[in-house]
Image: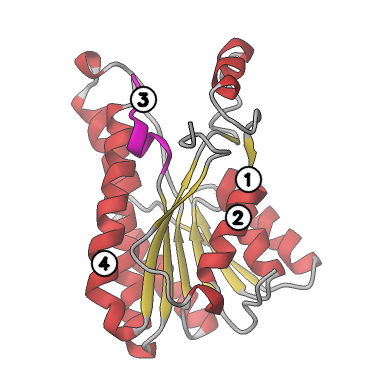
Amino acid sequence: MFSLKDKVALVTGASQGIGRATSLALAEAGAKVAVAARNADKLASLVAEIEAAGGEALAVPMDVADAAQVKAGFQQALAKFGRLDILVNNAAITRDTLALRMKLEDWDAVLRTNLTGAHLCIQQALGAMLKQRSGRIINLSSVVAETGNAGQANYVASKAGLIGLTRAIAVEVASRSITVNAVAPGFIETPMTDPLSQELKDKMKAMIPLGRFGQDREIAAAIVFLASDEAGYITGQVLGVNGGLHAG
Protein backbone atom coordinates (compact mmCIF):
# COMPACT_ATOMS: atom_id res chain seq x y z
CA MET A 1 0.00 0.00 0.00
CA PHE A 2 1.20 3.54 -0.73
CA SER A 3 2.38 5.51 2.30
CA LEU A 4 0.32 8.45 3.53
CA LYS A 5 2.30 8.92 6.74
CA ASP A 6 1.85 12.39 8.27
CA LYS A 7 -0.98 13.21 5.83
CA VAL A 8 -4.42 14.40 6.96
CA ALA A 9 -7.55 13.33 5.11
CA LEU A 10 -11.23 14.21 5.31
CA VAL A 11 -13.77 11.75 3.90
CA THR A 12 -17.43 12.61 3.41
CA GLY A 13 -20.13 9.94 3.48
CA ALA A 14 -17.76 8.01 5.73
CA SER A 15 -20.31 6.16 7.85
CA GLN A 16 -20.83 3.20 5.49
CA GLY A 17 -19.97 1.59 2.17
CA ILE A 18 -17.19 3.06 0.06
CA GLY A 19 -16.66 5.99 2.43
CA ARG A 20 -16.12 3.71 5.40
CA ALA A 21 -13.78 1.42 3.47
CA THR A 22 -11.85 4.45 2.21
CA SER A 23 -11.44 5.87 5.70
CA LEU A 24 -10.05 2.57 6.95
CA ALA A 25 -7.69 2.27 3.97
CA LEU A 26 -6.38 5.82 4.36
CA ALA A 27 -5.75 5.21 8.05
CA GLU A 28 -4.02 1.91 7.28
CA ALA A 29 -1.75 3.79 4.87
CA GLY A 30 -0.76 6.15 7.70
CA ALA A 31 -3.08 9.13 7.30
CA LYS A 32 -4.94 10.85 10.10
CA VAL A 33 -8.58 10.80 9.06
CA ALA A 34 -11.51 13.13 9.75
CA VAL A 35 -14.61 11.06 9.01
CA ALA A 36 -17.70 13.07 8.09
CA ALA A 37 -21.33 12.00 7.72
CA ARG A 38 -24.77 12.61 9.20
CA ASN A 39 -24.87 9.50 11.40
CA ALA A 40 -22.91 10.29 14.56
CA ASP A 41 -23.22 6.77 16.01
CA LYS A 42 -21.72 5.10 12.92
CA LEU A 43 -18.93 7.69 12.87
CA ALA A 44 -18.10 6.95 16.51
CA SER A 45 -17.88 3.23 15.71
CA LEU A 46 -15.59 3.93 12.75
CA VAL A 47 -13.29 6.16 14.80
CA ALA A 48 -13.07 3.44 17.46
CA GLU A 49 -12.12 0.87 14.82
CA ILE A 50 -9.41 3.11 13.36
CA GLU A 51 -7.99 3.90 16.80
CA ALA A 52 -8.05 0.23 17.83
CA ALA A 53 -5.83 -0.49 14.82
CA GLY A 54 -3.36 2.18 15.94
CA GLY A 55 -4.59 5.03 13.75
CA GLU A 56 -5.86 8.51 14.53
CA ALA A 57 -9.31 9.72 13.56
CA LEU A 58 -11.89 12.39 14.30
CA ALA A 59 -15.67 12.14 13.92
CA VAL A 60 -17.16 15.17 12.17
CA PRO A 61 -20.98 15.01 12.07
CA MET A 62 -21.88 16.95 8.94
CA ASP A 63 -24.51 17.21 6.22
CA VAL A 64 -22.67 18.27 3.05
CA ALA A 65 -25.86 19.86 1.71
CA ASP A 66 -25.69 22.46 4.51
CA ALA A 67 -23.04 25.12 3.85
CA ALA A 68 -22.84 26.15 7.51
CA GLN A 69 -22.29 22.57 8.64
CA VAL A 70 -19.60 22.06 5.99
CA LYS A 71 -17.72 25.16 7.12
CA ALA A 72 -17.96 24.16 10.78
CA GLY A 73 -16.88 20.59 10.02
CA PHE A 74 -13.75 21.65 8.17
CA GLN A 75 -12.90 24.12 10.92
CA GLN A 76 -13.19 21.28 13.43
CA ALA A 77 -10.87 19.05 11.41
CA LEU A 78 -8.30 21.81 10.90
CA ALA A 79 -8.39 22.71 14.59
CA LYS A 80 -7.64 19.09 15.46
CA PHE A 81 -5.00 18.25 12.87
CA GLY A 82 -3.63 21.64 11.76
CA ARG A 83 -3.65 20.88 8.03
CA LEU A 84 -5.56 19.06 5.30
CA ASP A 85 -3.84 17.08 2.56
CA ILE A 86 -6.59 14.86 1.15
CA LEU A 87 -10.30 15.43 0.51
CA VAL A 88 -12.49 12.54 -0.60
CA ASN A 89 -15.94 13.68 -1.75
CA ASN A 90 -17.97 10.50 -1.37
CA ALA A 91 -21.27 11.62 0.20
CA ALA A 92 -24.22 10.81 -2.05
CA ILE A 93 -27.94 10.04 -1.97
CA THR A 94 -30.47 8.67 -4.44
CA ARG A 95 -34.11 9.57 -5.11
CA ASP A 96 -34.91 7.25 -8.00
CA THR A 97 -37.92 7.53 -10.30
CA LEU A 98 -38.57 8.06 -14.00
CA ALA A 99 -37.83 11.61 -15.19
CA LEU A 100 -41.46 12.25 -16.13
CA ARG A 101 -42.55 11.60 -12.56
CA MET A 102 -39.58 13.11 -10.73
CA LYS A 103 -40.56 15.77 -8.21
CA LEU A 104 -38.52 18.94 -8.15
CA GLU A 105 -37.63 18.37 -4.51
CA ASP A 106 -36.14 14.96 -5.39
CA TRP A 107 -34.09 16.50 -8.20
CA ASP A 108 -32.88 19.31 -5.93
CA ALA A 109 -32.05 17.02 -2.99
CA VAL A 110 -29.79 14.76 -5.06
CA LEU A 111 -28.01 17.61 -6.85
CA ARG A 112 -27.59 19.53 -3.59
CA THR A 113 -25.94 16.61 -1.78
CA ASN A 114 -24.02 14.90 -4.57
CA LEU A 115 -22.78 17.90 -6.55
CA THR A 116 -23.24 21.11 -4.60
CA GLY A 117 -22.03 19.34 -1.45
CA ALA A 118 -18.79 18.40 -3.20
CA HIS A 119 -18.35 21.99 -4.38
CA LEU A 120 -18.84 23.31 -0.83
CA CYS A 121 -16.28 20.84 0.53
CA ILE A 122 -13.77 21.70 -2.18
CA GLN A 123 -14.09 25.41 -1.33
CA GLN A 124 -13.30 24.71 2.31
CA ALA A 125 -10.44 22.32 1.53
CA LEU A 126 -8.77 24.71 -0.89
CA GLY A 127 -8.38 27.32 1.82
CA ALA A 128 -5.87 25.03 3.54
CA MET A 129 -4.39 23.39 0.46
CA LEU A 130 -3.56 26.63 -1.35
CA LYS A 131 -1.59 27.84 1.67
CA GLN A 132 0.28 24.53 1.80
CA ARG A 133 0.79 24.55 -1.99
CA SER A 134 -0.15 20.88 -2.03
CA GLY A 135 -3.19 18.65 -1.82
CA ARG A 136 -5.24 15.82 -3.26
CA ILE A 137 -8.95 16.07 -4.05
CA ILE A 138 -10.75 12.89 -5.13
CA ASN A 139 -14.40 12.97 -6.18
CA LEU A 140 -16.56 9.84 -6.35
CA SER A 141 -18.41 9.77 -9.64
CA SER A 142 -20.04 6.64 -11.11
CA VAL A 143 -20.07 4.44 -14.19
CA VAL A 144 -23.62 5.67 -14.86
CA ALA A 145 -22.26 9.18 -15.45
CA GLU A 146 -21.02 7.83 -18.77
CA THR A 147 -23.60 5.14 -19.57
CA GLY A 148 -26.80 6.70 -18.24
CA ASN A 149 -29.37 4.75 -16.21
CA ALA A 150 -33.14 4.77 -16.47
CA GLY A 151 -34.91 6.13 -13.41
CA GLN A 152 -31.85 8.00 -12.15
CA ALA A 153 -31.77 11.23 -14.13
CA ASN A 154 -30.97 13.26 -11.01
CA TYR A 155 -28.26 10.88 -9.77
CA VAL A 156 -26.67 10.50 -13.22
CA ALA A 157 -26.68 14.26 -13.73
CA SER A 158 -25.00 14.79 -10.36
CA LYS A 159 -22.29 12.21 -11.04
CA ALA A 160 -21.65 13.54 -14.55
CA GLY A 161 -21.47 17.02 -13.05
CA LEU A 162 -18.76 15.79 -10.68
CA ILE A 163 -16.61 14.84 -13.65
CA GLY A 164 -16.94 18.35 -15.06
CA LEU A 165 -16.24 19.85 -11.64
CA THR A 166 -13.17 17.64 -11.28
CA ARG A 167 -11.67 18.84 -14.55
CA ALA A 168 -12.48 22.51 -13.95
CA ILE A 169 -10.93 22.61 -10.47
CA ALA A 170 -7.93 20.57 -11.64
CA VAL A 171 -7.05 23.30 -14.12
CA GLU A 172 -7.65 26.07 -11.58
CA VAL A 173 -5.32 24.72 -8.88
CA ALA A 174 -2.63 22.77 -10.77
CA SER A 175 -0.11 25.60 -10.37
CA ARG A 176 -0.24 25.06 -6.59
CA SER A 177 0.60 21.34 -6.85
CA ILE A 178 -2.97 20.34 -5.98
CA THR A 179 -4.35 17.44 -7.99
CA VAL A 180 -8.05 16.81 -8.56
CA ASN A 181 -9.27 13.48 -9.89
CA ALA A 182 -12.39 11.35 -9.92
CA VAL A 183 -12.98 7.66 -9.32
CA ALA A 184 -15.95 6.18 -11.15
CA PRO A 185 -17.02 2.91 -9.53
CA GLY A 186 -19.03 0.34 -11.43
CA PHE A 187 -21.46 -1.95 -9.62
CA ILE A 188 -20.14 -2.31 -6.08
CA GLU A 189 -21.48 -4.33 -3.15
CA THR A 190 -22.62 -1.56 -0.79
CA PRO A 191 -25.72 -0.67 1.25
CA MET A 192 -26.90 1.22 -1.86
CA THR A 193 -26.99 -1.97 -3.96
CA ASP A 194 -28.11 -4.37 -1.21
CA PRO A 195 -31.87 -3.75 -1.73
CA LEU A 196 -31.72 -4.78 -5.42
CA SER A 197 -33.45 -8.03 -6.31
CA GLN A 198 -31.30 -11.09 -7.03
CA GLU A 199 -32.72 -11.20 -10.56
CA LEU A 200 -31.55 -7.65 -11.22
CA LYS A 201 -28.16 -8.33 -9.65
CA ASP A 202 -27.69 -11.36 -11.91
CA LYS A 203 -28.54 -9.27 -14.99
CA MET A 204 -26.06 -6.62 -13.92
CA LYS A 205 -23.29 -9.18 -13.32
CA ALA A 206 -23.87 -10.61 -16.79
CA MET A 207 -22.81 -7.24 -18.25
CA ILE A 208 -19.51 -7.19 -16.33
CA PRO A 209 -16.57 -8.98 -18.01
CA LEU A 210 -15.13 -9.97 -14.61
CA GLY A 211 -18.52 -11.49 -13.76
CA ARG A 212 -18.94 -10.02 -10.30
CA PHE A 213 -19.71 -6.87 -8.36
CA GLY A 214 -16.74 -4.95 -7.00
CA GLN A 215 -15.84 -4.67 -3.33
CA ASP A 216 -15.74 -1.35 -1.49
CA ARG A 217 -12.12 -2.01 -0.55
CA GLU A 218 -11.21 -2.12 -4.26
CA ILE A 219 -12.53 1.41 -4.71
CA ALA A 220 -10.71 2.46 -1.55
CA ALA A 221 -7.42 1.15 -2.98
CA ALA A 222 -7.81 3.33 -6.08
CA ILE A 223 -8.49 6.35 -3.87
CA VAL A 224 -5.40 5.67 -1.74
CA PHE A 225 -3.30 5.55 -4.91
CA LEU A 226 -4.65 8.89 -6.17
CA ALA A 227 -4.01 10.39 -2.72
CA SER A 228 -0.39 9.25 -2.70
CA ASP A 229 2.79 11.01 -3.80
CA GLU A 230 3.14 8.43 -6.58
CA ALA A 231 0.05 9.91 -8.29
CA GLY A 232 1.48 13.42 -8.26
CA TYR A 233 1.48 13.76 -12.08
CA ILE A 234 -2.14 12.68 -12.50
CA THR A 235 -4.83 15.37 -12.45
CA GLY A 236 -8.15 16.06 -14.13
CA GLN A 237 -8.66 12.35 -14.79
CA VAL A 238 -11.45 9.84 -14.22
CA LEU A 239 -10.35 6.39 -13.05
CA GLY A 240 -12.96 3.76 -13.86
CA VAL A 241 -13.05 0.83 -11.43
CA ASN A 242 -15.80 -1.26 -12.96
CA GLY A 243 -14.66 -4.81 -13.72
CA GLY A 244 -14.23 -4.08 -17.42
CA LEU A 245 -17.78 -2.82 -17.93
CA HIS A 246 -16.62 -0.52 -20.74
CA ALA A 247 -14.24 -3.03 -22.31
CA GLY A 248 -16.82 -4.72 -24.52
Work out which residue is located at the far front of the displayed protein and give it. Answer: 248
The residues tagged by marks 4 and 2 sit, at their Cα atoms, a distance apart of 22 Å
Q: Earlier in the sequence, mark 1 or mark 3?
A: 3
Of the 4 image quadrants, the one containing the N terminus is: bottom right
The residues tagged by marks 1 and 4 sit, at their Cα atoms, a distance apart of 26 Å
Instruction: Please name the amino acid that badge 2 sits on.
Output: Ala
Secondary structure of the residue carrying numbered label 3: loop
Mark 4, residue position: 169
CA neighbours of label 3 inside 10 A, class few (<14), some (14 to 19), many (20+)? few
Image point 56% across, 15% down: which residue?
Answer: 203
Q: Earlier in the sequence, mark 2 or mark 3?
A: 3
The residues tagged by marks 1 and 3 sit, at their Cα atoms, a distance apart of 21 Å
Instruction: Please name the amino acid that badge 4 sits on.
Output: Ile
Magenta segment range? 142-150
Image point 63% across, 69% down: which residue?
Answer: 57
Residue 59 appears in the picture as rendered: no
Numbered tag placed on residue 157 in the rendering: none
The residues tagged by marks 3 and 4 sit, at their Cα atoms, a distance apart of 26 Å
Residue 105 appears in the picture as rendered: yes
- Is 113 left, or right, of 228 in this rendering? left
